[in-house]
Image: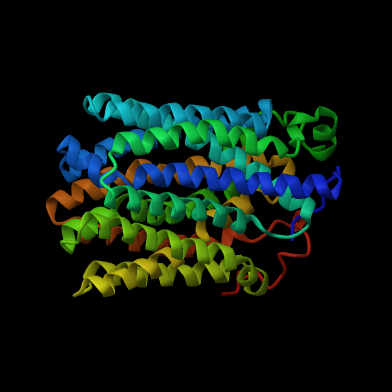
Amino acid sequence: MTSAPNITFPAPQVAAASRATYAAFIGSGFAFASWASRIPQVRDGLELSSAGLGLLLLAIAVGSLIALPLAGLIVHRFGSRLTVTAMAVLLGIGLLTVALGFLVGIVPVVIGLFLLGFANGAWDVAMNVQGASVEQHLGRSIMSRYHAGFSLGTVAGAGVGAVMVLASVSVTVHLLVVAIGTAVVVPVAVRGFLPDLSENADHAEKADKGSSDKGSVFRRWTEPRTLLIGVFVFAFAFAEGTGNDWIAVSLIDGYQASAAAGTVGFAVFLTAMTAGRWFGPNLLDRYGRVAVVRTLAVVATFGLLVFIFSPSTPLAFVGIALWGAGTSLGFPVGMSAAADDPAAAAGRVSVVASIGYCAFLAGPPLIGFLGEQASVLKALTVVAGLLALAALVAVALRPLPIAGPAEPAADDGNI
């Protein structure tokens, strides 16, 4: 359970904010997966090698990594609602640029992906800060279910993408529709967000008496626990992001699967991740953060190895499902741990997300270049080492004393 907030809102307002938070997560997931579901077609249309595709995907990571360190300040200054609203519009512009730029060449696609990455990074921090706020007011741990909403959005986006591929709908038409929908629907859907602590200066001062410079969110970079949580999230984000970027390509190149089968494999990964995030709170409440994420790291590693070394495509799909389920709780649990203290949530979530998103900077080019030397499938073995690192540093996820009774002593460090 989370700590009780120092300011309360009527129950209907909190319920409306919870629905708005789900909408923000679902919309973000749908928009991202819509792009990711067309990666193989973009690669073929631009005639890119594995290394070239890795560099193209790097544009998303660069945009995110510029946005993330600034996101804490942005959310603190403007609030999570205005941040998500602005970033939804910017992400729509990015997808629009990709959709039209795909007809021209690589450069406009890179520009569009950079905008997409920037918008996605700031959007991610803002919706996690809002999720933590709603979690505080509801009085129970539901962050992973918001992330399940993100995964549900990605499943829907991947599913629509598979239909678009089967129906031979062009990348341009598909992404144009998604771009317009994102820029219009999400700003309306998030109007129910709760005000953040930073939007009430008097309350902010009361909530953080030990800090006379609460607005200086950059000082969170000096906190050892926050940095260790960031390392943990980095490892799980690498495992998750590698699946998002490379499963479809690996199935097509490594197993000679069809383009549609590659997209279905991506959807299987996202479906398994969604299920893990939805049912995860029960496991977390019963066994604690550290025990659960360490177990899931083992599950993800086993699934990854099955996928890499499977003698058949059907068994590879089993590996994909285990990989997705195993990586499901890493990112949301890291965000919850970073937001244990609501008064410091914006700064800490920004730090942890910044470190975690470095995985999206390192992942695409690393897997792409290793894939050039051997194969993309074999290159995926590097993920296993990072999951082992995550298991080692997971002890940093122990709830802070202020986090309250619902994240109990059943947690974990003894395992």
Q: Is residue 173 above or below residue 327?
A: above
Q: Residue furthest front?
A: 167
The number of numbered badges drawn on the structure is 0
User: How are the residues colored?
Assistant: rainbow
Front-most of 153 and 125? 153
Q: Quadrant of residue 193?
A: top right
Residue 235 location (% of width, % of height): 42, 55
Quarter of the picture holding the C terminus? bottom right
At 14% from the left and 38% from the top, the residue drawn is 47
Q: In the rendered view, does 5 fall on the left or right side of 117?
A: right
Q: Quadrant of residue 189?
A: top right
Q: Is residue 407 above or below residue 110?
A: below
At 73% from the left and 28% from the top, the residue drawn is 213
Q: In the rendered view, does 364 fall on the left or right side of 218?
A: left
Residue 298 location (% of width, % of height): 42, 71
At 26% from the left and 73% from the top, the residue drawn is 314
Q: Is residue 229 above or below residue 361?
A: below
Residue 233 location (% of width, % of height): 49, 52
At 25% from the left and 46% from the top, the residue drawn is 168
Q: Is residue 51 visible?
A: yes
Quarter of the picture holding the N terminus? bottom right
Residue 283 location (% of width, % of height): 61, 72
Q: Is residue 341 visible?
A: no
